[in-house]
Image (spheres, rainbow, N blue to C red):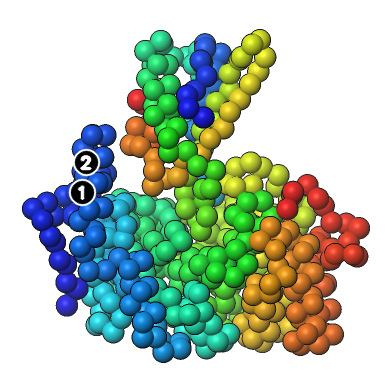
Amino acid sequence: MKELPALGNDATVRLSRQGGQVTTMTRPREIEFAQCNVDEREQICNVLNRCLPQTSTDVGRGDQRFYQIEVRYRSDNRDDQLRFTVPEDQASEELKRLWDKGQV
Amino acid sequence: MSGQRHYLGFMPPYILNRLIDHGSEWQRSRALKTLTHVRQFLPATARQSQASVAEAHQPGQLQRNIYDAQHLTVLPGALVRVEGQRASGDVAVDEAYDALGATHDFFWQVYGRDSIDNRGFALAGTAHYGEGYENAFWNGAQMVFGDGDGEVFQRFTRSLDVVAHELTHGVIESEAGLVYRNQSGALNESISDVFGVLTRQYVLKQTAEQADWLIGADLLTDKVKGKGLRSMSHPGTAYDDPVLGKDPQPAHMDDFINTQDDNGGVHLNSGIPNRAFYLVAIALGGSAWERAGQIWYDTLCDKNLDNDANFQAFATLTVQHAHQRFGTEAADAVRKAWEEVGVGLAGESPNERTSGLG
């Protein structure tokens, strides 16, 4: 995936930290674009787009943690979604902050 | 002596590490490149240490290198204690050293296995990883231990079974290479729990009946309503806490969790084979590492165990190995244990659920 699709007012981003010895501490964070202003949406999309080079499907082995990003959105008048994962040791500080604090 | 640190160049590695963790993207990128360059000249990294071990290794000879990440997240960190050196005085470093030694000793004395690769792999462990880091892991080259946040979790080096669990991930990669997803991933996790808990029982000289069958009992602070991270005897009962939530592990195939999280629930559904192992150990009695552990070890090392094996395939092989090594009675005990958790054997399993996708 080279770039996120265009995300409109109806998009939802769900971030969670998965894997590791402690399974119940994923602390999923859901961000509804309808609750964000245009600047916030753009900043979130920028953070997610900058994650894309670090995505991997081979994550979690040996209790290594990873960030899971799920995006639900409308495309061509139908619901769509995508999911990608970033190894913890490759995750940017801005992604971690978005998950942890909900801030960009 | 706390180990020698050789810093070459004008910029010490700890400053580079600081930039990598806290600098801007540009600073991070430049610091990472510089650190990678500097590391070429440093005396030992986890991978480099393997070459020197291979040169002159006596079977069963233990080689440990313990590093200090200094609360950063760059591995392996500063080398602070090597094999044979006296205690460093740093509790986490010395716990990691001792626990890796105990795990190596367990595999060597009980199963004749010479470290992770059965060829004397030098054990590398890094303590003080990150800030308040609530995890321990195996990254394919070494073990890594966080200090915990102090509120919910204490330092992860406190728990011998957790350290042994991480080392066992290396053993599994070296043997069956169980794919870390869905049922094969849950088997990967379960086998790590099995040999993690057996290492502790071996050190404490506990029988199956005496053991608590908990993973990570030493990790939780007094503030947590729980006994440990996982219970192998009664999965799903390890904790029920406002912060941690409730232990979600199932103990039977009827409660198998279908999920895309956690690599398909590898830390969740491992409760099912964990309980099967516990039931075998109790049925056979005595020291669990002697018979139940040997059956599981033989199965792990069996070339017929596919890397994408599901519970049924693994269970079927355990029954075969129980029979080969200990006879019909042991094989019946193993078969009964799998039946009790709802896993049928290949060719005789009308009740086996297939929703786990193996």
Counting from the top left corner in percent of width and height, residue B212 is at 58, 73
Picture coordinates of residue A39 (x, y %)?
37, 13
Q: Is residue B178 left or right of residue B317?
A: left
Confirm whether residue A60 shows in the render.
yes
**What residue sits right under mark 2 in the picture?**
B30
Would you say A23 lies left or right of B349 here? left
Q: Quadrant of the N terminus of chain B?
A: bottom left
Q: Amino acid at mark 2?
A: Arg
Category of crowding for the residue at label 2, using alpha-carbon neighbours closer than 10 angstroms: few (below 14), some (14–19), many (at least 20): some
Decide: few, some or many residues near mark 1? Use Cα within 10 Å; few <14, some 14-19, many ≥20: some
Amino acid type shown at disc 1 = Thr
Please give the name of the residue rendered at 21% of the width and 44% of the height, measured from the top-left corner: B31
Task: Residue B19: give its label.
Answer: none
Asked where in the image residue B125 lies, by quadrant, the reply is bottom left
Image vertical order of residue B267 relative to residue B276, above or below: above
Q: Residue at x 65, y 72 (%)?
A: B300
Badge 1: chain ID: B
Are the residues tagged 1 and 2 within 8 Å (C-beta)?
A: yes
Q: Say which residue label 1 marks.
A: B34
Residue furthest to the front: B55
Tell me the element at label 2.
Answer: helix
For the point 64% across and 47% down, the residue is B264
Task: Measuring from the top left, give residue B117's x and y in whole percent.
Answer: 50, 74
Instruction: Pick whichever, A97 or B38, lies toward us.
Output: B38
